[in-house]
Amino acid sequence: MLRRFVLWFGTLPTIAKILLALVALFVFGLSVALSPLVTVVAFIVFFIALLALVFRATRGRSVKTWVIVAATSLVFVLVFSGISAALYGGGQPERSSAPGPTRNASPAPTQASAETVPETTAEETTQAPAVEFACPDFADQEGAQKVLDQNPSNPGKLDPDSDGLACESLDEEPKPKPEPKPDPEPDPEPNDSLEKRGKVVAVSRVVDGDTIEVSPSVDGIEDVRLIGMDTPETYGGTEPYGAEASAFAERELAGQRVALEFDAERIDPYGRALAYVWLPDGSMFNDTLVGEGYAQVATFPPNVKYAERFLASQREARSADRGLWGLSRKQLCQLADRGNGIGEGSAGCVAPASASASTSVSASPSASATASSAPTPSAPSGGDLDCSDFATQAEAQAVYDQDPSDPNGLDGSPEDGVACESLP
């Protein structure tokens, strides 16, 4: 029969063999999981096989088939009963085998350990000073004092004068504490009230980009000049980008309640109040004008409180060609020279004057020679300069010295304060 099954199995296609093997594995796994039930069923089959075996033997009939069934069912009973015991009941006999002795024996070790631990701890505590601690072993007097307090009867080297204080020398020369650095004055937060920023007024009129009139007046003065920066002029000849700066100030300030913050000098030579103007949203309008490219930095000591802040905003606006920094070189040279490398009279704007001088005196060879030696830097339309815009290192250095923050990047690597070292 087994041979017939083997031959039949061999005739099956490969996929059928695989499926049959998977079914067999599934059935076996299910049998393992249900091993208690399988054990009961196998025992019942075994019992029925025995009865059939006895019945057929007494009748003189063949018992071969029932012998196989009985043997197989017996094997199933033994195998699956062992699996069931291992999975579901292997540890129960051990836990319930000797409950009495376990309960009776457990207090004894507990009591012994309770008695032993304090003795060991006491010995260790008593022997702690015997390690011969010395004052150099501690960072401060407090640590040495704790060890001495654990065993005051045996001070060792910690309390040589026996006055109860350990290592008094550790506190004789305390380490100097670093002096606290003064906290920098924080900028007012947007949620601060205007009263915390300065004198609160209303903007009654915008004169131009950097000058306003306020109400009520400040010590009898209505005109307020924003300090730390300078917008292009709109009076006495409009400078490039002056109209845009004035329009921006009109749009942002007209009718607004603002706070005026004063610096060291409060009034300029023209009788105007000098102030930083704070808006209700927490922004400083002076810095906004610089950061948006409506103004260039113009610092006049002693009013230098926010000078570094303004220079940082100008560097950002200049690198982005924002506002007036996007004007052509010719337009930039029409602005006021505030030490930022632009404006009439700056080193970057002397080329037109030199060219005119050269044309007007072209009949004189000596004058022509002088004019031709004048610096003739040219710059991109964005207003930035680089070393190729200068004929000599001295010309580049003059522009760099006007604004050591080096917005044009003339001082390359290393940054040693010398501009365009490659030039003659």
Image: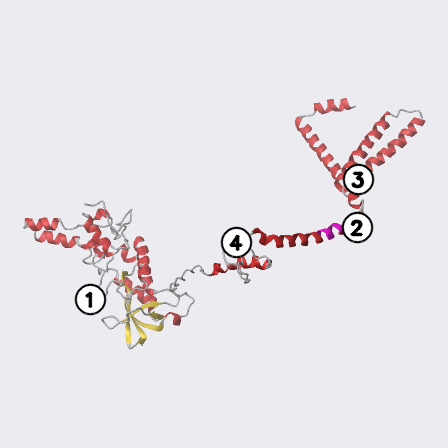
Q: Is residue 402 left or right of residue 183?
A: left
- Of circles 2 and 3, which is in front? 2
Residue 256 visible in the picture? no
* Secondary structure type for disc 1: loop
Mark 2 and 1 residues: CB-CB less than 8 Å, in contact?
Answer: no
Q: Which residue, as the protein is rendered here, is positioned at the far bottom?
A: 220
Q: How far, Cα to Cα, is label 2 from label 1?
A: 111 Å
* Mark number displayed over residue 236: 1
Rendered location of residue 235, percent (x, y): 22, 67
Q: For the residue marked with disc 1, what is the amino acid?
A: Gly
Rendered location of residue 85, percent (x, y): 78, 39
Mark 4 and 3 residues: CB-CB less than 8 Å, in contact?
Answer: no
Q: Is residue 383 left or right of residue 14?
A: left
| First reached walking from the N terminus: tag 2 or tag 1 | 2
| First reached walking from the N terminus: tag 3 or tag 1 | 3
Q: Is residue 44 above or below residue 119?
A: above
Q: How far, Cα to Cα, is label 4 from label 2?
A: 50 Å
Specify start and end residues of the magenta stretch as a single range. Answer: 108-113
Q: How far, Cα to Cα, is label 3 from label 1?
A: 109 Å
Q: Main secondary structure of the magenta part?
A: helix
* Mark number displayed over residue 37: 3
The residue singled out by tag 4 in the image is 134
Q: Is residue 61 above or below residue 79?
A: above
The crowding category of the residue bearing disc 3, from other C-alpha atoms within 10 Å (few below 14, some 14 to 19, many at least 20), is some
The crowding category of the residue bearing disc 2, from other C-alpha atoms within 10 Å (few below 14, some 14 to 19, many at least 20), is few
Q: For the residue marked with disc 3, what is the amino acid?
A: Leu
Q: For the residue marked with disc 4, what is the amino acid?
A: Ala
